[in-house]
Amino acid sequence: MWEIELTACKYSKLGKFMHALQFADVLSINLSEARLLFNIEDENALIEAMKKLPISMILFRVGERGLYTIQGNVHSLHPSIDSNQILDPTGCGNTSTGSALYAYTEGKDAIMVGIMANVAASENIKQFGVIPEFSSRREGAIQLSKQIYTEYYK
């Protein structure tokens, strides 16, 4: 998974981006980064542009609204999971990306990848800074992900 850095997100670097993309299976990018890289402001137009990229999956993070998973010509919005204990958003993007990578390498489909990413971010936001250790929360997060996944297909 390539979590692109802001410094690489310039329209003038789009050619280099396309070259580097061949070495990744999954791209993680946020709304601000995508706008700069593709020189497109409209979110729907960005999604359509990213659908054309030669990559297996894209995790397109849109802040507190959640994220999209994009795979081929299909995209799905995964709204953020409500948390009654919001303390600090620091690291939520990295936490969601790490969880998405785990889900992807475990063979989960795009819907579950997005759900697991959001569940991890919802756990991260409950304390100050990045989650230092996740194992004590892992089983609960997996169960919540399975519940949301089941509800998604109802």
Image (cartoon, helix red, strand yellow):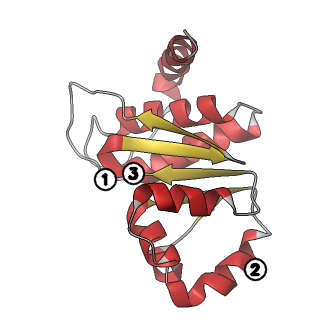
Q: Amino acid at mark 1?
A: Thr
> Dot 1, crowdedness within 10 Å: few (<14), some or many (≥20)?
some
Classify mark 2: helix, strand or loop. Answer: helix
Q: Residue at position x 70%, y 31% from top? A: 109
Q: Earlier in the sequence, mark 1 or mark 2?
A: 2
For disc 2, the marked residue is: 19
Tell me where residue 52 appears, x and y as whole percent. Answer: 69, 61
For disc 1, the marked residue is: 90
For disc 3, the marked residue is: 62
Tell me where residue 46 appears, x and y as whole percent. Answer: 50, 62
On the picture, is 26 further left or further right than 42? right
Q: Earlier in the sequence, mark 3 or mark 1?
A: 3
Measured along the vertical axis of the image, is residue 93 above or below residue 66?
below
Q: Amino acid at mark 3?
A: Val
The answer to whether residue 132 is visible is: no
Image quarter where the N terminus lies is bottom right
Q: Residue at position x 71%, y 76% from top? A: 18
Disc 1 to disc 2, how far (Cα)?
31 Å
Disc 3 to disc 1, how far (Cα)?
15 Å
Tell me the quarter of the picture where residue 86 sits.
Answer: top left
Q: Residue at position x 53%, y 55% from top? A: 47
Tell me where residue 100 appears, x and y as whole percent. Answer: 59, 42
Classify mark 3: helix, strand or loop. Answer: loop
On the picture, is 25 further left or further right than 4? right
Disc 3 to disc 2, how far (Cα)?
25 Å
Q: Residue at position x 56%, y 47% from top? A: 98
On the picture, is 37 further left or further right than 64? right
